[in-house]
Amino acid sequence: MNVTILAFNIALIIISIGFLWKGSEWLVTSSSKLAHSWGVSDLVIGLTVIAIGTSAPEFAVTISAVIKGNADISISNVIGSNIFNLGFILGGTATVHAITTSPKLVYRDGFFLIAVTCLLGFFLFDYHLEGSLMALSRWEGIILLVILVAYMLHLFIKKEELEEEEIPHGKVTFFDVILLLLGFAGVVGGGHLLVDASTIVAREFGVSDWVIGVTIVAAGTSMPEFATSIMALIKGKHGMAIGNLIGSDLFNLLGVLGVAGVMKESLVVSEEAQSSIIMLILMMVLVVIFMRTSWKITRWQGATLVIINLVRWFIDFTGKG
């Protein structure tokens, strides 16, 4: 590769990180202000509006894979991103600073996330459409979408507030809406730019396409969640920090796979998905246990999640390579 082109892509990586960081700052500030003006908590806005926005890269990759007829990529992208969110991002964020949780976050959202993942596992493991093959059918995709809509309606109707996050906010202006849109554009655009530029650089250094997919692409599409959660934590908005990750995982499972499932009569995937689904369920159970312990995820617990994700990557590399 031309040295100039290589240098250009390295520069793009640096620029993309800047987009992610600044975009996430605008996103957290404006969405929190708007949420409080609507009587909605930082946790709820993290579970819904921000989660949907930061899941845009996963949505784009998954839908593109379905259109191209690659069901394995469409489903493995979501499962892999969710594991990455819980391991590297939630764990890494907690390692920087312990994250305060709450009973509602644990008993409502945490258990709901486990239940949804188990439901997806049941849909994939039932083998009822393609003989011995695993598949997600169209009606199962519809069920996932209906559950997502019902869950989001419940959150906005209830409008529960976290008392520890009752921070005064100024009057909402039209500029706050513009800032929210710019924030979304920054985190989503920055994530795409990071994936593209990093892939080009990685290939130049001899990294295989498979390794690029499970590392750079998985990490790159999750960068919006990472940047947003770190920025929320810096601003003391713990509910938004963890709500963004849980909400993103929920939207990936219910929204992204729901739409993907509806687009095809059935999405047939390889049986390699079994171990990944089981891994995701176990990680979610562990995360909920950590969330319930002293109502916070401590730094050592965060480090544990990061280590688990590193071990998973090592097994993937050695198993595939």
Image (cartoon, helix red, strand yellow):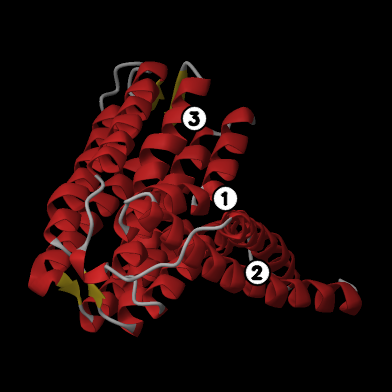
The residue mark sitting in front, 2 or 3, is 2
Q: SS class of the residue under badge 1?
A: helix
Q: Is residue 193 above or below residue 306?
A: above
Task: Give the structural element (helix, strand or loop) at label 3.
Answer: helix
Q: Amino acid at mark 3?
A: Ala
Find residue 228 and report its horizontal and vertical position in percent: 47, 66
Residue 256 percent location from the top left of the image = 46, 37
Name the residue at 38% across, 28% down.
145
Residue at point 31%, 34% (across, down): 153
Of the numbered discs in the image, which one, if any, rests on residue 19? 2
Judging by the rendered image, the residue that carries numbered circle 3 is 260
Residue 5 located left or right of residue 52? right
Residue 57 circle label: 1
Q: CA distance from mark 1 to mark 3?
A: 14 Å
Residue 164's place in the image compared with 179, above or below, is below
Q: Quadrant of residue 301?
A: bottom left
Q: Residues within 10 Å of mark 2 (few under 14, many from 20)?
A: many
Q: Do callouts 1 and 3 mark residues in contact (Cβ within 8 Å)? A: no
